[in-house]
Amino acid sequence: MKKNTFILFIIGLLVLVGCGKKVTEYTPKLQNFFYSYSKNGVSCDYNITTSTNKVVLNASGNTTNCSINEIILDESQIEKLEKIIDDNKLKAWNNFKEQGEYVSNGEEFSIQIGYDSGENIFAYGYMKFPDNYQNVHNELIKLFEEIK
């Protein structure tokens, strides 16, 4: 009888402790992300929002490539976005607000990033862009295409 009690005690202990495996929940640094661009007649808005237990991507625009309706992002997709932001030093873009003169129907972009720390980044350009803009644009579009 004591042997059965000991075995039940060990099983109960393993259940309570979880067999030593600690499960951690991923919490992204990003609270929201918005990227909008218009170029050669194509315009697209990508919007990522964080709510309880999920991070959601929506996109809209004047082309079918920009049509995404509530895709829940996984940890690896969020990390890829955070890597693009960090590797390209988008924090340095904060408060970039420039536009070219005498141009109509030109290229433009807008980006807004909000962090759980309360820090926010905003940049806007019309025919003028921060350093490395085209590379960032290409990386973002590639990521969003992969997610679809």
Image: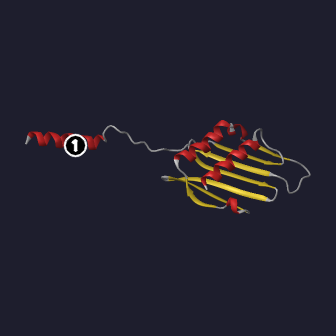
Q: Residue at x 12, y 43 (%)?
A: 4
Residue at the spot 69% in from the left edge and 63% down from the top edge: 64
Is 129 drawn above or below residue 62 in the view shown?
above
Q: Secondary structure at mark 1?
A: helix
Res 72 quadrant in image: bottom right
Residue 65 spot, x, y in % from top left: 69, 59
Image position, residue 113 (x, y; %): 65, 46
What residue is shown at x 17% (from left), y 41% (from top)?
7
Identify the image quadrant of residue 71. bottom right
Q: Quadrant of the C terminus?
A: bottom right
- Any part of residue 122 in sight: no
Amino acid, disc 1: Ile
Which residue does the numbered mark 1 point to in the structure image? 11
Q: Relative to residue 9, is residue 65 drawn left or right?
A: right
Residue closest to the eye, 123 or 18: 18
Closer-to-camera residue (88/118)? 88
Residue ID at (70%, 48%): 111
| Quadrant where the image shows the N terminus | top left
Furthest-front residue in this view: 146
Specify few, some or many for label 1: CA neighbours under 10 Å numbering under 14, 14-19, or 20 or more.
few
